[in-house]
Amino acid sequence: MRRSDGVNFHGAITAYQAGASGQGVLAGVIDDGIDVDSPEFAGRISPLSADLAGSRGIDGEGSHGTNVAQVLLGAKNDAGTMGIAFNAGLLVLRADQPGSCATEDPANDESGCRFPESVIAAGLDRAVSAGARVVNISLGGDDPPGATLRAAVSRATAAGIIVILSAGNEGDTTAGGNDPNNPGRFAQGLRDAGGGLVVIAGSVDENGAISGFSNRAGAYAASYLSALGEGVCCVYENGALKTEGNFVFLLNGTSFAAPQIAGAVALIAQAFPNLTSQQIVELLYQSARDAGAAGDDAVYGQGILDIARAFQPMGATTLAGSATAVALGTPLGMLGGPMGDAGGGATGIVTDGFGRAFNVDFGQSLAPRRPDFKLSGAIGGRVRQQSAASRSLALSLVTAPGAGGSDALAGLSYHDAQRARTLAASVMMRLGAHTRLGFAAGRGTGGLLAGERGESGHAMLIGDAAHEGIGFAASPGIGTLLRHNIINNQYINIYAESGRVSGSRWQDDPLPGHSARRDSRYQRIGASWDGRFGPLRPSLGASWLRESDSLLGARFGPFFGAGGATSLVGDAGLIFDAPGRWQIGGAWRQMWTRPDARGLVAGGALWSAAFSFDIAKAGLVRPGDRAALRFAQPLRVARGGIDLMLPVAYDHGSGRADFGRRIYNLAPTGRELVVEASYALPLFGGDLIANSWWRRDPGHIAAMPDDKGAALRFTMGF
């Protein structure tokens, strides 16, 4: 027969991982004594243990008390049964009437151990004086308890002792007027006398189904908790495992469900000494695994004991030492594209609805931004272009159906997932013999400058140039470019643009629990130099980039402080026009970023880089065609992060926390690398363009599968 045990069934391993074992907590067991020679209790039997019904000592005649105690706190010694609270102290309160256990006859339910109510009451009083935190009473009877016992239960609970009772094993019979749909009368009476610190234990099997023999919760659902009481390993007699051949004898009964709950009380009391007994009971109920009808029900009561969940934050959570709410389990913000799968390392303390302190890794609280898959936006919809040009003025308008928030079409940025119509316009004016002035709407100044330099985009779909745009997904608004020929073919460019960071609204990448709709805007001001020296065309540039409410596209949300960032950007590029209409080019971008010190963000620094390398050939197969190959890395945080001021120590007594600086690393483990080939062929007044690509770690997310594909498209200007 397969062995079942409460340790695994109820998730006690989570408590052990948190350092709880019941050590320092005294648990009382009112029963027929224990086997004092059993190694399960060695060194943990309280000297205040006693035979309250005589002078026989605590070494019992039967095995019921031994089996109850071992389920509660049997030693972790790689032998026999391991109890729920394996390091708790044991207060043995022997209460069986002398000689009664010797009369046990399996065929007669009225035979066997008898427990006078006055002795049980004495056991409860002794538990109070001994300082026990929990008392297990796996006893019952057909009659309600008398006044003496009810008064003792009232005194014990008033002293803060949690009393665990078995519901009874008459769930499959109505003999003697028993009501199987309610706990036994004995348990009912003690619950009525002891109030909220009395828990009635029902039994379930290893599948979580109510045991046929177990009395149900009935009218006592508010104080009824289910636990494993069927097929519990194992029966011990005379200090040894009871076996028959290859089989072991298992325990059945609500008597063995009760100590599972008593052991959970001991674990919680040790791990969270700030909790009152009432809070411990409430925690057991709130964390219980729901079973049967939703919520409280007349069969399972509050549900099934779940120690693992009891050791997780429950209720509203706040940053320790503050009133700042922390919505655990939901993203507190969204990472930017250059950060990929970054996260981890910024641990702090939160308190839950019970005032318990928990360490939380806030580095796992930001959702990664979905990788930009630009193919659908780039090839979707019809494109119409209108242009007019003269010696002093050039105007271009481009319209296309929106394609769901993708950047596309060689500098035209798309936004608004509702297939809105996007308009981009640019105009270049000659101010004199050496100066030109340009304006753009709906496209970045980088596109204007590339056009003025005569750079080719090589008709790429996936591998954007390293110096394109601001380095992460954005929707340009307006921009201006002043270009001046300083000498021969050398130019100075001054530019400014503004726009919106794509995905900056929560509704673009929905985050549960967030309703903020404020945009993150950006402004960029810069200057660059480019020149032509025979076949070489070098360029250098520097710019200042300001994000109002984002950090390289990341949104940290109100919990962190929702601040912005300032970046310094350096760009370098070189194009070599080789003989035979070959062209080789490369570009590099380096960014240094400082987040705003606001809210929990105390500062920090990020170093990011992007690059691309191109080789292209015009007239490869026939006149007018163009083939190109690109190897690129989109902007990626190479190192650095933000400094968070988080609570690192917490005093339960005063409710005060000590704050310390923690570094939230924003460098991803993934590194996106793109290899893309394109071939453009003039055809029917337009261009037939074929692309193929391989993209490793899309979005700098190591767990993402490689993105491989090919596309064929036809474009035509009007």
Image: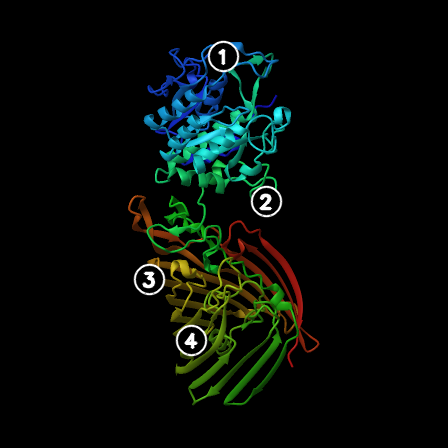
Q: What residue type is labelled 1?
A: Ser
Q: Which residue position holds label 4?
A: 531
| Mark 4 element type | strand
Q: In this view, does 384 lie to the left or right of 323?
A: right
Q: Which residue position holds label 1?
A: 100
Q: Is residue 487 visible?
A: no
Q: Distance between the residues labelled 4 and 2?
A: 74 Å
**Which residue is at the front of the view, 479 or 549?**
549
Relative height, residue 539 to residue 66 (above, below): below
Q: What residue type is labelled 4?
A: Gly
Q: How far apart are marks 1 and 3 (CA)?
A: 75 Å
Relative height, residue 466 to residue 265 (above, below): below
Image location of residue 214, percent across then percent down? 59, 29
* Marks 1 and 4, the one that precedes in the sequence: 1
* Marks 2 and 1, the one that precedes in the sequence: 1
Label ID, residue 597: 3
Disc 2 versus disc 1: nearer the observer: 1
